[in-house]
Image (tube, coloured by chain):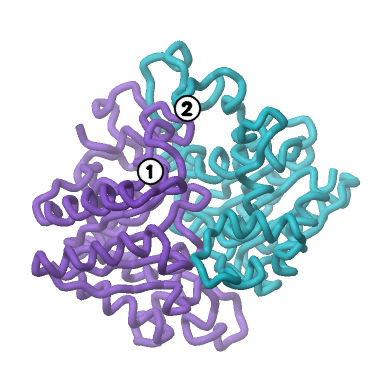
Chain colours: A cyan, B purple
Amino acid sequence: MNVLWIFAHPEPRSLNGSLMTDALRTLDGLGHSYEVSDLYAMKWKAVLDADDVGGPPDDGGRLFVGAAQERAYARGALSADIRGEIEKLERADMVVLHFPLWWFGPPAILKGWFDRVLVQGLGFGVKGPDGRTRRYGDGGLAGKRALVVTSVGARPSGFGPRGIHGPAEEVLFPLLHGTFWYTGMAPLAPFVAYGADRYDAADHARTSAALGERLRALPDEEPLAYHAESGGAYDEELVLRPDLAPGRTGLGVHRRP
Amino acid sequence: MNVLWIFAHPEPRSLNGSLMTDALRTLDGLGHSYEVSDLYAMKWKAVLDADDVGGPPDDGGRLFVGAAQERAYARGALSADIRGEIEKLERADMVVLHFPLWWFGPPAILKGWFDRVLVQGLGFGVKGPDGRTRRYGDGGLAGKRALVVTSVGARPSGFGPRGIHGPAEEVLFPLLHGTFWYTGMAPLAPFVAYGADRYDAADHARTSAALGERLRALPDEEPLAYHAESGGAYDEELVLRPDLAPGRTGLGVHRRP
């Protein structure tokens, strides 16, 4: 496997920094290759703007973000930092997003990686030979797998099925389903380090070992099974068929039983 | 009411730009005052780093983000742009977040507003007189109300109870529950402009009028009713009591019936 490890923490000496160091050593030991995008170390530009696509429209008109991205992508005119990340992404079999959970989502620097790199024509708006949009289980990144590695201050119970913060897989739905699955990547169950505000050396060793185990098992791990858009589970209005998860509503209905 | 309108779109001539212009005029007409944080126009710094809190720790040690924020907040040493936003927030009765939905969340520039402005001691980690953390229905921003105004390319059915993208209120849970409610703000039902990729002048007029109606009704509108952390709905493990939403799991259980 070739792994792209995307890291978003301002402090390399943090718990997450050490976990990444350990994890990369594990990948090495397993004979996998990897590339790292350490977004803070790269001083990654977080904010999507007209400079990403070669500047404002020549005719002085409105910037339409998606269309401008797609044109710039097609003619190789995206900014160099974005092109570099797309090349890494194309080489990767597996993408790891590693970040502390801030306000129940990725830090801005990582959100900006999605906004800027997953351009129209690659991340969305990709048409198949039948003219239909390839999306949710298919798309420009089909064939890759993706893993979230994150840390939270809370205990596991708060992120459980009826925990106050919401189940981790539902809180992370915009990433797991709305970003990975949407672009065709197979999402793996997230790896969450709980209680990260109160870590001692033993907690660190235990979490690092648990992450190592996940990495060892990765090539054979079953992804989270969401329904595919093109698989017949949804009607023409993109609503789940009544015989699937009958009578239920909410994010959970999109997981295959 | 004094409204803080936070806007995150790179193109002022966009649909969202026009909707904001119309909305501010409506607020004026209703006799409300407002301040605007137009994040792109302000060239808002999206990425939280040590410069936010007066630089890296003096002792050359690790940056602990929350603790460093809280110390800098207490001694007035947060960077000037953050202090400015906190002052606006303190003056506001109502906060509006206005953005196009990118990858099922706010653009990076707006995510960075949360990461940087909602510091420990204000947005989280606020203790009450009993020593308990004030959170979910209480906290540093208690008494304020908050509204998401967003645009999506999709039709409403895809964001319905069984729609492929997930129900809008659950996709936005990290904001509505994990950010607004967490910090004590009362979240209102989000205003979503659907089909925004295919807008004509009539669609624009209709959406602008609908947003105007929402703004007119705001002072009397009932917020989304989530359970409060301190109200007895959760046990010591922060799990919802079994007699509430019995047998159910997922994000939806946290709404009061």
Mark 2 closeness class: few <14, some 14–19, many ≥20 residues within 10 Å: many
Rendering quarter of residue B3: bottom left
In the displayed orientation, state which residue is furthest to the top.
Answer: A243
- For residue B194, the mark is 1
Separation of marks 1 and 2 at Cα, in angstroms: 14 Å
Left or right of A32 on screen, residue A69: left
Question: For this rendering, which residue is in front, B124 or A52?
Answer: A52
**Residue at left offset 33%, top offset 60%:** B97
Q: Quarter-wise, where is residue A251 in the image?
A: top left
Task: Give the x, y percent position of residue B224.
Answer: 22, 44
Which residue does the numbered mark 2 point to in the structure image?
A: A238
Q: Find residue A189 and report its horizontal and vertical position in percent.
A: 61, 37
Foreground pick, B117 / B216: B216
Position in image of residue B46 (x %, y %): 50, 71
Say left or right for B9 vs A50: left
Per the image, label 1 sits on a secondary structure element best described as loop
Find numbered disc 2 in the image and state the secondary structure of the residue it sits on: loop
Residue type for callout 2 = Leu
